[in-house]
Image: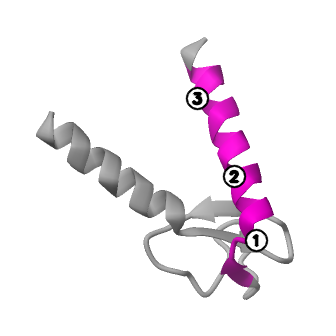
Amino acid sequence: MIISKKADILILRVMKMIFICDKCRFIFSRTVQPEQCPDCGKYAVREANEMDRQEYEEHLKEFQGDENG
């Protein structure tokens, strides 16, 4: 159980570090803010706002639903 709690804390910490590219609208999570977008390579990455975070969470839920069948 302790390992699970530590993993949950780590996941929550990473989930809080959500970024978006203002050029291609790619939403992603990282432990530190990158200079460039990992998708298009532009220097237009910023921290996600609340609306962007909700979209990111919806994508995660859809992805997890697809994996579970």
Task: Residue under label 3, please give it.
Answer: 64
Magenta stretch? 45-67
Task: Residue under label 1, please give it.
Answer: 40
Cβ–Cβ below 8 Å for labels 3 and 2?
no
Mark found first going from the N terminus, 3 or 1: 1
Vertical placement of residue 37 versus 63, above or below: below
Q: Position of residue 45 (x, y in %)?
A: 70, 81
Task: Residue under label 2, please give it.
Answer: 56
Q: Is residue 69 left or right of residue 56?
A: left
Residue at image position (70%, 31%) is 62
Residue flagged by tag 2: what amino acid is it?
Answer: Tyr
Cα separation between marks 3 and 1: 25 Å
For the C terminus, the quadrant is top right
Cβ–Cβ below 8 Å for labels 2 and 1?
no
Marks 2, 1: nearer the viewer:
2
Residue 59: image quadrant is top right
Q: Position of residue 6 (x, y in %)?
A: 22, 49
Secondary structure of the residue carrying numbered label 1 = loop
